Amino acid sequence: MSELLGVAVLGAGHMGADHVRRLDRVVSGARVAAVADPDTGRAQEAVAGIDGVSVHAEAAAALDAPGVEAVLVASPGPAHEEALLAAFARGLPVLCEKPLTPESAGALRVMEAEVRLGRRLAQVGFMRRYDAEYQRLKSLLDSGRLGRPLMLHCTHRNVSSPPGFTSAMLVNSSLSHEIDAARWLLGQELTAVTVARPRSSAKAPEGLIDPQFVLFETAGGALVDVEVFVNCGFGYQVGCEAVCESGSARIGDERSMAVTAAGGRREEVAQDYLMRFADAYDREVQAWVDATRAGRVTGPGVWDGYAASAVAEAGVRALESGGRTAVELVPRPALYT
């Protein structure tokens, strides 16, 4: 491996461009070696001022570019499976943004390919595991000082939804991080989903069921409820309260900068995930680079990506049927135990 880990970034949109910036200016031990995006002009813009980067329209060309030793997948979800399998075929370690794949069937194919290799190569970008608040809550729950967790109360609010956003996407896109965070915080698989529909906000685009109230059941008997509201209009807010046998703990109420001027006082509210979780993304990518340079794979893996996809699919079925829907998972391969 070279002195600096050469990374190919697949996708130069909002997330991919931010990862290019992060690898170039924030993370130590790595460099951007190649970028691929069908819009090569956008890719060129993302790498402007960075020396030694090749730009490609096709992902495969970026994987085969000189100096590439690892891959960061930030392309749209439908392109993830092909990119992951191509990276596996070349023995390249991967950090893949969520979702691992949009459907659990694709995630299963990725998992089967990694199992055939006999070693982990992929980490999935569930960055909340690297957020300082989430890590403190995880440590507290694992310590047992509050007794067994009984419930998690979660909120997930966005300023507005992008064009083309569907009611199903509140579950299979917006809630994917809550799904993984709940599994990780509790150390339990989610076994069933129920989705309730309060009346939609007047701010929601016509036909969009927003907000939604989602209830997850776990293998250990805990309950997780999530308010997901993607057109709240005022800010990006993520919170989680754990209610345990002997106490409770809540995260997501951290204070941001307050500005006093012109006879008034205003407190800033994060407007998107890149603002709220900037530090978590930095920690996540740095941890991935450090592990990759050491020949290891840490963090959430392909099993976690598959489980999230399977739970999300059950959630969409629950949204459509209006009833409780069981989550069906295949047996967990030994590689992920």
Image (tube, rainbow, N blue to C red):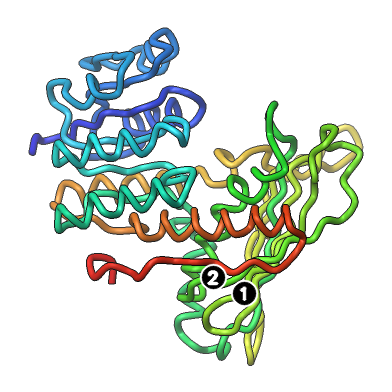
Specify the quadrant that holds the N terminus.
top left
In x, y percent, where is residue 280? Answer: 46, 50
> Residue 20 falls in which quadrant of the image?
top left
Indicate which disc residue 217 carries.
1
Please state which of residues 316 and 3 is positioned toward the viewer in this rendering.
316
State if disc 2 and disc 1 touch (CB < 8 Å): yes
> Which quadrant, please, contains the C terminus?
bottom left
> Can I make out residue 310 in this image?
yes
Task: Kindly identify which numbered label has been placed on residue 47.
Answer: none
> Residue at 19% of width from left, 31% of height from top?
6
Residue 126 in the image: state x and y as whole percent: 45, 52
The percent position of residue 70, horizontal first and vertical second, equals 21, 37
Mark 2, residue position: 190
The residue lying at 16 percent from left, 24 percent from top is 64
Locate residue 221: give its quadrant: bottom right
- Say above or below: 288 vs 248: above
Which kind of residue does numbered mark 2 sit on? Answer: Leu
Residue at coordinates 57% horizontally, 88% vertically from top-left?
A: 146
Give whichever of 103, 97 is nearer the camera: 103
Amino acid type, callout 1:
Glu
Count of marks overlaid on the render: 2
Residue 222 located left or right of residue 231: left
**Residue 249 can be seen in this image:** no
Find numbered disc 1 in the image and state the secondary structure of the residue it sits on: strand
Mark 1 or 2, nearer chain start? 2
